[in-house]
Amino acid sequence: MAAVSNKARWRAIQTLSLGLAAIVAITLLNRFRPQPLEYAEAVAADLRVYARQPPPPTGIVAIAAIDDRSIAMLGRWPWARTVHARVVDALKDYHVAVIGFDDLLSERDPADVQRESIMAQLKRAGVAPHALSAILGASNDLGFARSIREHGETYLAYAFNSHQNTGQLAAVDLSAYRTTFLDPPPLAYSLVRKQPGAIENTLVANAYLAPIPILNSAARGIVYADIDEDIDGVARSYPAVIRFNHRYCVPLFLALVDAYLGHPQTTVELSPDGVEYVAVADHAIPVDELGRMMVHFRGKPGTIPTYSIADILDHRVAPGLLKGRIVLIGINAHALGDRFRTPVGGDFPGVEIQANAIDNVLAGDFIFRSKRTLAEEQLCGRILGVAISLAAAFMTGLYSAVVLVALGAAYLAYSTWRLSYDGALIGLVFPWATLGFTYFVVVSYRYFTEGKEKRHLRRAFELYLNPDVVASVVDDPAGLRLGGERRHLSILFADIVGFTSRAERSEPEPLVALLNTYMTVMTNVIFENGGVVDKLMGDGIMAFWGAPVHVQNPARDAVNCALQMLEQLKALAQRDDRFKDVNIGIGICTGEAVVGNFGGEGRFDYSVIGDTVNLASRLEGLTRQFKVHLLVNRDTFDDAGPGFIAREIGMVRVKGKQQLVPVVEIAGHEGDSVDPAYYRRFAQALDRLHQGESPESDLRALLAERPGDQVTAMCLERLESGDLAAMREMVFEFDTK
């Protein structure tokens, strides 16, 4: 025994060491080749975040859409600046609080360029300067700038040439961009806090595409409208800060929130890891170390209130829908582009991404990932890997699989709680991959080492013992000792009717051949239904359910097995003439019994003993008295549950027992060829007896319908010989087995 223990201990140490090696391997893979796991994590995060209905929008932000209807009414895009001016004036009439243009106005109005060319020609022709304006009219850009200035809270967008992590800027053509600021420069955070050891690990740009100077100076501020895409091309986050020329620039969505709140202080705080957070007044916004805020989308495109510019210009939008709101002006028409893939839709307008970001800040509803959440998920992954290594090293395969599922479910529950509690998006893929890969490695090792030995033992002993018993002994050699335990079991006895007389008139060789065929079919049926064949006694079979392996419903498995045995006997009779006159009786009893190893120290048998076993044997014998195929005690029928065609016969007192036992005949499954109406009518007849009425007429009608029904005949005989006034139950007593 000491040698066995040492061998098992050494194997457990090897298994645990292999599990730790698997954890190191997947950690290194994630460090040096992270793209596959990152891609899978992005998809998993989308499923988790949007598996439930997102919160509704606040209603504070709305979109003035440059849609197909507006283009049909106002002409092809891009529009003249006079149209832009009309839109701003109309929104001013609606008393809109803040206006944001998600549209780059980096080029002059073509009409103004043409106007200047004509003005130069007229000057050379001698036309007086004061007459030029009367002839050519006012500048479109100037008129638009006047409308912007009069509104007072209009913000214009600009774009960076690119924004990358520090030290990663690509060389690009900057001819259309500015590397120095126009006056006034882009809006920047009003306060930059730096913790001790802080680093400027933000996104960086080196040039920007600004609005034309006249519009740049007229706006309340200019802000960037750049949107990020992840490794899989899906837009999930928005850079909340980009550093350009030593300024920490503010994005469009945050500037509009700041204006709506009355221009409080905007803050960016830097830590030794990078960006700690950004804030508007006391609205702290969680971001990652590069300053990117994840957008919690409110739903599919169109969830944020959207109104056509055509309706706004014609004042067809109810005033209350826009008054006091933040209004974003942007492109919604499909042919004009500015659309992105997002977790909630593959054709999402960029302006609505901006609107969702604004709504997140106003609602204080955020989801976020950062180095801290990444470190937490990696720590959890290693803990899961160690836990499953221990389970696989010291537990059986079944129990370690249960632990695997439990650990995976527990981590899912924890990460879901964190997402609901504070918006922390702790990844699933790395922890689950570590758990699954480690489990696969250690279980594979155990299978090819310990499993090889166990498979050899099973193949040898299954020729002599029940496979379930062999499995329990191989899995737990300590089970090879005398003793038993009390279990809730279902016991089945089956015998061939009239086998003794058949044996007297048959030669031994064909009789043995018939028995071998019969036993092969029947034992296979028992094994398929999870039963343990206890004994083969001539033509008799004893089997049980509920040990050594626990089953959920031993009674139902036993009844299903019995019905299948009867079906297989019919099939045998159809293909083998030897079985045409073979009939069997089956009895099943469910209850408490003692199961274990019984015998002597040198030779014992795995079996079951107890009153439940005796009653099952008696029930099998009663099938001859009642001339039925399958009898069970009431506990078996109740435990088995619905789905069977059956009838309760009554109470019987069998040989060797003083207590009356309720007995039920089971004729088949619901939906089989058995007529359930006949059995219902029999039950109704007995119900009349229970109520003190005579069911004689009902029983005679049933017997006339089925003259060979011995149960009904015996009930009629019992009625005729008993006192109906005192009788409330059919009671049968038998002196023989």
Image (spheres, helix red, strand yellow):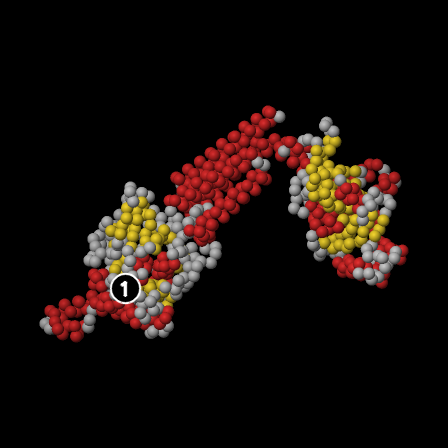
x, y (%) of residue 106?
25, 60
Residue 480 or 464: which is nearer the viewer? Answer: 480
Residue in view at x 17 percent, y 67 percent: 117
Say if 529 sits above or below 108 in the image: above
x, y (%) of residue 144?
24, 67
In the figure, is residue 266 to the left or right of 435? left
Residue at image mark 1? 154
Image quarter in which the N terminus is found: top right
In the figure, is residue 673 to the left or right of 250? right
Residue in view at x 36 percent, y 64 percent: 60
Residue 285 or 519: which is nearer the viewer? Answer: 285
SS assignment at label 1: strand
Residue 322 or 65: which is nearer the viewer? Answer: 322
x, y (%) of residue 312?
34, 71
Instruction: Judge whether residue 25 can be spotted in this image.
Output: yes
In the figure, is residue 733 to the left or right of 8? right
Instruction: Judge whether residue 205 can be spotted in this image.
Output: no
**Label 1 sits on what residue type?**
Thr
Residue in view at x 80 percent, y 53 percent: 650
Q: Quadrant of residue 643?
A: bottom right
Q: Residue furthest front?
A: 726
Image quarter in which the C terminus is found: top right
x, y (%) of residue 348?
39, 59
